[in-house]
């Protein structure tokens, strides 16, 4: 990657202008200021703070941001209308470095139908608007709205007019997200080759995502000679949005071999900016969104998790730290394998023998088949339950219960008692009662139930249940715990766990075979 000035790509962030044009994304002055501060900390080259003529509120936002931001250029949008330009000029006045961004459409459709202007009148409007903007600042950007559906010879004339009138940045937007990367690259190449004094301006991309090509097109535009990318945090913007800043910046940073360019963006600020914009706008970032989505650095498959544990480069092309994330996550689920499960147990502080590990892994997989999200709490409950019961004389092997709101419940229980399998079918007033009746029948004595408690290990209806049972027998009181995704099985396991403790207590007070 070459770090020459010629290969530097300026990042023009329009989250506060085009981003705010997303239906429902309106932001208050305070919110815009907070975002502008993060953009400045990221070293964004230009912050488009709003469209000053749009409203008094927009004017005030541009003005306040212009007052407060010192290390990025602050810009306001303006139509090719003198009133718009005056308002923009006034709003950016306090800025250490201020830009006016004026635009007019150049495609036949927009000129005829929307502007209802002859092409010659559009050329005159370009001249007037850019010249007028230069009275307020030397930094004037001119955009050919709908450039990608414009006729090239007319586009050349329009750009030449803008440069002659003093525009220092020429933006060629793909306003409706219509271009393909090859076409967009070719447009920049043709323009730069055919426009007089093209070297006097920086060319800029501005891509919309109607066909999901905004980032690819922006990068193609740079390959075609553009050296400014207009983009937004999280890709928010009109309709399907704009090119996502985090994606273009990380593509350039990560693929310097294929894209020999650089930006000055402080990429570890990306996550903070993404979260702030999402919070302020109320637009959730989709889980699989590149760079900033919740799953962008998360791995659930056993084969990937194994690779990650051996060397993160097997499945990650950039480090989480490079975008401001603490670390990648290995999400535990039904696709996880033994390597990741062992690593998770180590993280949680468990050291299991081989048999216990294999049994816990079997139960973990079974849980994964039934439960969408497996949290650390699920694994802790499962392993604690396994560790607590594996050495016990009595264990629940299987339990089926049938209950109805109309009558009693039936329990079909199989247990091992001192290595011997025993089975019974019993009735009770409800499924838990039926299970407890069955246990008492198989163990051959009747402890007194003092307490029965259930709580969910995590949230959701598929959460594991964790049960506590307190039993009293012959003056001895014990608590037993059990966890399972089936609440009645968790209750039975808790009951049997308490029974085992009673047996241990009885053995201790009266040693000898029982
Ligand atoms: C591709 C883009 O993102 S462009 C930016 C889009 N953003 C916005 O529009 C958000 C802010 N906009 C607004 O607040 C309002 O639209 C305003 C204040 C700019 C204008 O409001 P109004 O005067 O009520 O006009 P309205 O929005 O209904 O229509 C737009 C007018 O601007 C004209 N116009 C559109 N683009 C331009 C341009 N670049 N230069 C000059 N005139 C233009 C239209 O032809 C139309 O003119 P008409 O009234 O003579 O028919
Ligand atoms: C105002 C211009 C730059 C724009 O947002 C577009 O064409 O999409
Ligand atoms: Mg736009």
Image (cartoon, helix red, strand yellow):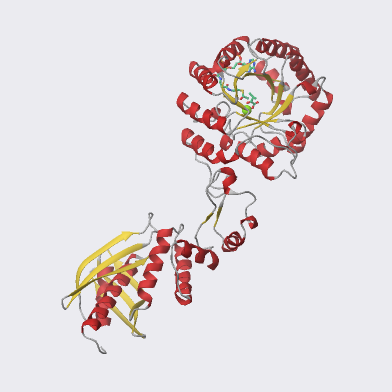
Residue 314 shows up from this direction: yes
Query: Which residue reaches farthest bottom?
Result: 513
Residue 426 shows up from this direction: no
In terms of image quadrants, where is residue 4?
top right
Q: Locate residue 73 relative to residue 205 in the image: left or right.
A: left
- Residue in view at x 41 percent, y 68 percent: 383
Q: Quadrant of ligand 2?
A: top right
Query: Which residue reaches farthest left?
Result: 475
Q: Locate residue 215 relative to residue 40 in the image: left or right.
A: right
- Residue in view at x 44 percent, y 74 percent: 356
Depth check: give the residue in front, 56 or 94.
Answer: 94
Name the quarter where the N terminus is drawn: top right
Name the quarter where the C terminus is drawn: bottom left
Q: Position of residue 47 (x, y in %)?
A: 59, 26
Q: Position of residue 478 (x, y in %)?
A: 23, 72
Depth check: give the residue in front, 182 or 279.
Answer: 279
Depth check: give the residue in front, 104 or 115.
Answer: 104
Q: How many marks?
A: 0
Q: Position of residue 105 (x, y in %)?
A: 69, 20
Q: Is residue 504 above or below residue 77?
A: below
Q: Is residue 479 above or below residue 281?
A: below
In terms of image quadrants, where is residue 90?
top right
Q: Position of residue 236 (x, y in %)?
A: 56, 34
Depth check: give the residue in front, 207 or 412.
Answer: 207
Q: Locate residue 2 relative to residue 364 in the image: left or right.
A: right
């Amino acid at each position: 990657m070459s770090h020459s000035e010629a290969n530097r790509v300026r990042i023009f962030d329009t989250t506060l202008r085009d981003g705010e044009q997303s239906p429902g994304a309106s932001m208050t002055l305070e919110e815009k200021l907070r975002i502008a501060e993060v953009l400045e900390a990221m070293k964004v080259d230009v912050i488009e703070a709003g469209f000053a003529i749009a409203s008094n509120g927009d004017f005030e936002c541009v003005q306040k941001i212009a007052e407060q931001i010192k290390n990025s250029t602050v810009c306001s949008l303006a139509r090719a209308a003198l009133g718009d330009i005056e308002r923009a000029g006034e709003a950016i006045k306090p800025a250490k470095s201020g830009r006016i961004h004026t635009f007019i459409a150049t495609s036949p459709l927009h000129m005829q139908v929307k502007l209802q202007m002859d092409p010659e009148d559009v050329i005159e409007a370009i001249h007037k608007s850019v010249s007028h903007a230069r009275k307020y600042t030397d930094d004037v950007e001119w955009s050919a709205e709908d450039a990608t559906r414009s006729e090239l010879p007319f586009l050349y004339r329009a750009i030449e007019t803008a440069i002659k009138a003093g525009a220092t940045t020429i933006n060629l937007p793909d306003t409706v997200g219509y271009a393909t990367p090859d076409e967009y690259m070719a447009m920049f190449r043709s323009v730069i080759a055919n426009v007089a004094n093209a070297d006097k301006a920086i060319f800029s991309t501005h891509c919309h995502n109607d066909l999901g090509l905004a980032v690819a097109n922006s990068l193609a535009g740079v390959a075609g000679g553009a050296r400014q990318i207009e983009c937004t945090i999280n890709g928010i913007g009109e309709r399907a949005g704009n090119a996502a800043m985090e994606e273009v910046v990380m593509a350039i940073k990560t693929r310097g071999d294929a894209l020999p360019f650089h930006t000055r963006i402080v990429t570890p600020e990306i996550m903070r900016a993404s979260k702030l914009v999402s919070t302020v706008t109320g637009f959730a970032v989709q889980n699989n969104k590149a760079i900033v989505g919740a799953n962008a650095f998360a791995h659930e498959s056993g084969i990937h998790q194994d690779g990650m544990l051996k060397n993160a480069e097997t499945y990650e092309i950039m480090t989480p730290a490079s975008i401001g994330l603490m670390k990648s996550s290995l999400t535990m689920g039904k696709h996880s394998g033994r390597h990741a499960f062992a690593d998770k147990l180590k993280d949680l502080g468990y050291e299991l023998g081989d048999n216990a590990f294999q049994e816990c892994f079997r139960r973990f997989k079974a849980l994964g088949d039934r439960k969408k999200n497996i949290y650390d709490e699920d694994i802790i409950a499962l392993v604690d339950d396994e560790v607590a019961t594996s050495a016990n004389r009595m264990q629940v092997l299987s339990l089926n219960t049938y209950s109805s709101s109309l009558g009693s419940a039936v329990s079909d229980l199989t247990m091992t008692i001192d290595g011997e399998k025993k089975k019974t079918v019993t009735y009770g007033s409800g499924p838990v009662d039926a299970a407890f009746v069955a246990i008492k029948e198989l163990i051959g004595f009747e402890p007194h139930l003092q307490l029965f408690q259930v709580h969910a290990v995590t949230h959701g209806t598929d959460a594991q249940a964790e049960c506590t049972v307190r039993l009293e027998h012959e003056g001895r009181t014990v608590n037993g715990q059990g966890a399972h995704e089936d609440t009645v099985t968790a209750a039975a396991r808790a009951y049997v766990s308490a029974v085992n403790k009673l047996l241990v207590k009885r053995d201790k007070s009266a040693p000898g075979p029982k």
